[in-house]
Image (tube, coloured by chain):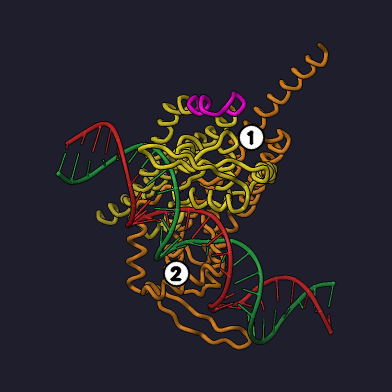
Chain colours: A yellow, B orange, C green, D red
Amino acid sequence: MSLPHALLGLLSYKPATGYDLKAAFESSINLFWNASLPQIYRTLSQMEKDGWLSFIIKHQEGKPSRKIYQMTDKGKKELQNWLAAPPEVPQAKSSLLVKLFFGNQMNRKDLAANIRKWREHYTEFLKIMDKNILPSAKGFAREVANKDELQFWMMAADYGVRNARMVVDWCDASLAVIEKNTRVKRTKQSRRAID
Amino acid sequence: MSLPHALLGLLSYKPATGYDLKAAFESSINLFWNASLPQIYRTLSQMEKDGWLSFIIKHQEGKPSRKIYQMTDKGKKELQNWLAAPPEVPQAKSSLLVKLFFGNQMNRKDLAANIRKWREHYTEFLKIMDKNILPSAKGFAREVANKDELQFWMMAADYGVRNARMVVDWCDASLAVIEKNTRVKRTKQSRRAID
DNA sequence: TGTCTATATATACATACGCACATATAAGCT
DNA sequence: AGCTTATATGTGCGTATGTATATATAGACA
């Protein structure tokens, strides 16, 4: 379970509201973790009950009040403990690979189309990373981070890029195999038709 | 949500009990999806209520009775529809990358140790794949699959191998960066000590 | 004028799933 | 004699999370 700790990590830069934290997620951690707004609110509320956070309410005119959370000493300790603990190895969950596993029951065209769609998604991701990674990193740096922090952000982003490249390569290799076999089958059919 | 469809896929080979399906998972789909025994039983029960499956009970001596599920026509249609539908792109969830993101707040030694642990896990995985992939695939082939099915199983396994190699490479690159910077810092400290 | 987006909070309902435990028998190990 | 493993079924409890919805205001757009 990482969401509370990811929130602690972001709050270690500066106090923030649930709404702020959602925005912070979107411009950074979203690459390797994801959280909806209701989930963030629920988690913050629970963390406050657990004594990891405290909050103050700041009233605004024309806009809703802001509930600004900040870490307590207990929260800081919790973050440190979590950071030092060995990370769980993520168990892969990929519905595409499950589908592929039963690919024999699929129309080859549908299967190839699905793989191509996946490929598109990751090439698109790579484009966005190329275009946005530096601006995004700079935005992050301006907001909260120093150069050391930027380095870690780049490492995490590098993981995302390597992963996307790996998937694209795999898609190409798999599409080649599927195409080759489809062609072989056609040839056999043609022969039979000639016979 | 893929578990019910993964179970449908396995049941498309032949009728089976929850216990059988757990074993089938472990020798194949476990690479890219995972399910506990209670979760499988619960899901089968729900699928039966939804009319995707029917079952017969086979009594055995000395052993518990077997509740053997098989697909209904509705279940077959459901599987076909699911297979043809475009797969959801998996949203990455990696607590190691979250930790790395806050790596600046960590002891560099702890961080490096965590990355090394990750690296070990994936090198171990690669070893097991090297040793077991063919025997495992053959076992799968003997059980349920023909050559075409084996090909798709190999494609999925290939994904796992490529992923593991990518992670190992990333670990090496990241460890190099962390080491380099640690050394630089030491040098600066040494200089300061000399000054 | 009505809809959409942004700001900001949150509840309600449902689903997926992990872990612990309950039940029963037989075989094999220490 | 007691423990673990394999076979086979489940329930109960808790947690994480997704989706829909409620509330309130202001500005932009069609």
Q: Which mark, by number, is residue B103?
A: 1
Q: Secondary structure at mark 2?
A: helix
State the extent of the magenta-drawn residues as a range: A137-150
Q: In which chain is the residue bearing label 1? A: B
Quarter occupied by residue B164: top right
Q: Is residue B43 visible?
A: yes
Image quarter of the C terminus of chain A? bottom left
Q: In which chain is the residue bearing label 2? A: B
Question: Which residue is most to the top?
Answer: B195
Q: Amino acid at mark 2?
A: Leu
The residue located at (68%, 37%) in the rendering is B111
The residue located at (33%, 53%) in the rendering is A188
The residue located at (48%, 25%) in the rendering is A134
Circle 2 sits on which residue? B11
Q: Is residue A112 above or below residue A25?
A: below
Q: CA distance from mark 2 to mark 1?
A: 46 Å
